[in-house]
Image: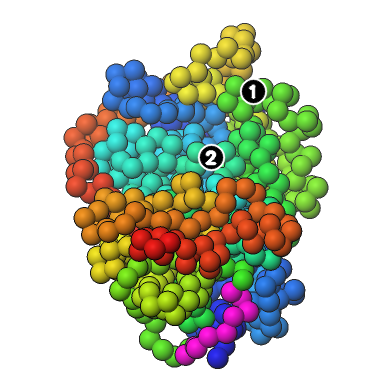
Amino acid sequence: MSIDISRDDALDLLSQMLRIRRLEEESAELYSQQKIRGFLHLYIGEEAVGVGAMRALRDDDNVVATYREHGHALVRGIPAGEIMAEMYGKANGCSGGRGGSMHLFSLERRFYGGHAIVGGGLPIAVGLALADKMKGESRVTACFFGDGATDEGEFHEALNLAALWKLPVLFLCENNRYAMGTAFDRHVSDDDIVNNPPAYGVHSETVDGMDVVAVERVVHNAAESVRETGEPRFVELRTYRFRAHSMYDAELYRSKAEVEEWKKLDPIEQLKERALGATLITGADIETIEQEVAREIEEAVQFAEEGEWESIDDLARHTYARDLS
Amino acid sequence: MTTYREAIRTALRRLLLEDSRVFLMGEDVGRYGGAYAVSKGLLEEFGEDRIRDTPLCESTFVGAGIGAALGGMRPIVEVMTVNFSMLALDQVVNNAAVMRHMSGGQFEVPIAVRMATGAGKQIAAQHSHSLENWYAYIPGIKVLAPATVQDAHDMLLAAVEDPDPVFIFEHQMLYGIEGPFDPKATPSSPWQAAVRHPGSDVSLIAYGGSVHKAMTAAEELEKERISAEVIDLRSLRPLDRPAIISSVSRTHRAVVIDEAWKTGSLASEISATLAEEAFYELDAPIARVCTREVPIPYAKHLEDAALPQVPAIIEAAKRSLGNG
């Protein structure tokens, strides 16, 4: 497959995807060492979606994500150290240790959170877009959610409301074929998620979520259309999670053969192959990126290790603007 | 004299006039004028952008209110009635209440949510709920129950000004009541309970619609030379525990009136507070006058029998004085 991007873009796409991959691998390792506890949902296999989509957005846009959001947060610009520290539960984490892996937030980066009630972030995205419309901002609110969320009433309600009120929401469905352990054809009546949004008058399209170049192109066009028209759009990103749903998942619901088939489509390997084939990059470039990423992850872990624990005296802090007790 | 609904409308108008970030949304708030005619005329005055009729999707329009608040607006969301608010509970419990804490203090949700509550209109089991305690249970949100015309106005102003999510429960039997109202009066803090009727023999502790029944009971008791003090809780979270304890420390007897089912009610919480913090002040067992633990029936005589009524309050007060 040919590739029509610049060397710089190829290097950045590869670098961003590798940052996610290595952060996730390190997180899994730290989970087994019990440095990270609670739920941990890895994004390995889905990197092209987060990287392509995030690059297609502007700094001033809003992002609402799910509980599988380490990659989105990282590419959005939250420092790896703050993400790692948050997973450690440290005070220097991006949510002060109160959110953990599933609830990464950044006011500065307009990252409105990892949301861990499936579908629950969609109405929030609609409201953020409503605020922007009422204030006359030209911002897009990008809302990530999985195929499982399309089962929820809030998915249909949010599409209806965003279309009815003409709100600048970019609905990004990361279809990784499983709602936790329930396969797509066992939880969705229609074969195709893209058939849903047109019922609400929302433009809908599908892109290969294992192809980072395609993801960026399609999401960029969709985002700019939302910005220009002020109306919502929907993009389905077809992808696959290589790892278990969470660290508790024994993966009894899918075959090893199926996972192996999808691994042949590894978005990082695909990009490497295409960029090398087109002589955009060299093996030495990849080696350099790997070294830089390794250093970044190492420093992130160090930042988390050295972080302070929030004082128990401050337990009630941030429950209200002012302490009520 | 002004009606409760007019007082709310006055507050809405003032907020819409004074703050461009404020808007009202909910089912039938615009062209219909509000299910309880609270927002009548506001669509004509403020337009479609700021008075928004929503589709019937409680979860999503409450969630959108939360999102708009995160986005810098000051939304007022009307969820027609508490009965429908259950469809939006996920957004309340998992988003509005936790956003500030879960984000380490980075994001706040300054939303005001209004809804009608309570029984008494013969609209049966699905439209007569009292679930204020469900909301008052949740740290991260605040809950107000205006019982008077002045409070109906003042509490909405306070709710919109507040940086945290505030839920206002308007008892459906109160929209038509008339009472003294001064739109220019300096509002008292909504987070403190009020003594509506001073007394020295027994404390009648109530909120929302039940305050009026407690007042009637206190007037009846006065004829029998029993001096009852009526405490209007006003705020259900935070609960003004010092005011409750202070009243009971004067009267030494407590009757809690709550239009919720008794089990797990706010009446239970208040009773537990008194048992924990004012046990030695009590001269009699705490009494609770609550709704019978049945779905609210349609037939008038049955509905009346299910709800707390004035005679039951009087009886409980007398019993606590040892002459019931």
Crowding around mark 2 (Cα neighbors within 10 Å: few <14, some 14 to 19, many 20+) is some
- Amino acid bearing label 1: Thr
Mark 2: amino acid: Ile
Closest to the observer: B324 or A211? Answer: B324
Instruction: Quickly name the residue at label 2.
Output: A117
The label on residue A182 is: 1
Position of residue A102 measured from the top left corner of the image (x, y, whole percent): 43, 37
Query: In terms of secondary structure, where does tag 1 sit?
Result: strand
User: Magenta part of the protein: which range?
Assistant: B174-182
**Left or right: A81 in relation to B180:** left
| Color scheme of the displayed model | rainbow
| Badge 2 element | loop
Q: Is residue B6 left or right of residue B149?
A: right
Of A287 and B270, nearer the camera is B270
Residue in the image at 41% along x and 56% along y: B287
B192, above or below A115, in the image: below
Left or right for B211, reference B57: left
Judging from the image, mark 1 belongs to the subunit labelled A
Q: Position of residue A43 (x, y in %)?
A: 49, 28
Q: Is residue A185 above or below residue A48?
A: above
Gap between marks 1 and 2 measured at Cα: 16 Å
Mark 1 or mark 2: whose residue is earlier in sequence: 2
Please tell me which residue is depicted at 53% across the width and 66% down the height of the picture: B311
Task: Locate the C terminus of chain A by quadrant.
Answer: bottom left
The residue located at (27%, 59%) in the rendering is B283
Please, is residue A154 above or below residue A42 in the view? Answer: below
Same chain for the residues under marks 1 and 2 in the image: yes
* Point 50% across, 88% down: residue: B180
